[in-house]
Image: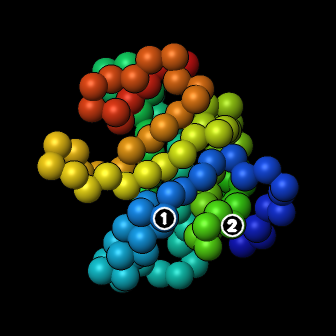
Amino acid sequence: MSTITNKDVQPISLTEGAVRELNRIRSEQGIPEEYGLRVGVKGGGCSGFSYILGFDEQKDNDETYKIAGLKVIMQKAHAIYLIGMEIDWQDGLNNRGFAFNNPNADETCGCGSSFSA
């Protein structure tokens, strides 16, 4: 079940800052190497959907990609909401955290962690 999907088009992209922060989190929290970065959506949030971002094991209905050196896991059904999205890490005075730049979002909330499509 650890097959990496070999596709020419990667569904999302990760900035250097996001990769650096994700690797730091993996190291600090002792996350096993076989876990991948789960990217997805769930119902809820102030705009309708909220993002899922965390390390997890691959499940049967997942697609797995190698993006910027990280194993990225995504449920097949979530792709329509996430294709083309960029995940960034912001570390400024006003914002600190992951930012989701999603071209599929019709609206986003002020916090940037939920959207409507």
Compared to residue 30, the image places residue 45 above or below, namely above
Q: Position of residue 13 (x, y in %)?
A: 60, 52
Residue that sits furthest to the front in the current view: 93
Is 14 drawn above or below residue 21 in the view shown?
Answer: above
The residue indicated by pointer 2 is 66
Camera sees residue 5: yes
- Quadrant of the snapshot with the C terminus: top right
**In the visual, does 44 lie left or right of 103?**
left
Of 59 and 105, nearer the camera is: 105
Asked if marks 2 and 1 touch (Cβ < 8 Å), the reply is no
* Quadrant (top left, top right, bottom left, bottom right) of the N terminus: bottom right
Q: Which one is in front, 40 or 22?
A: 22
- Give the image quarter of residue 95: top left
Q: Tag 2, which secondary structure?
A: strand
- Picture quarter containing residue 104? top right
Q: Residue 20: percent from the left, percent from the top?
A: 42, 71
| Residue at the (53%, 72%) spot, across then down | 35
Is residue 92 rendered to the left or right of residue 3?
left
The quarter of the picture where residue 68 lies is bottom right
- Does 111 sit above or below residue 93? above
Q: Residue at x 61, y 58 (%)?
A: 73
Q: Which residue is mark 1?
A: 16
Look at label 1 and name its amino acid.
Glu
Counting other residues with Cα less than 10 Å from the Cα at mark 1, is it few (<14), some (14-19), or many (20 or more)?
A: few
Q: Earlier in the sequence, mark 2 or mark 1?
A: 1
Residue at image position (43%, 51%) is 88
> Residue 96: x percent and y percent?
23, 51
- Regarding residue 1, the answer to whether it shows in the image is no
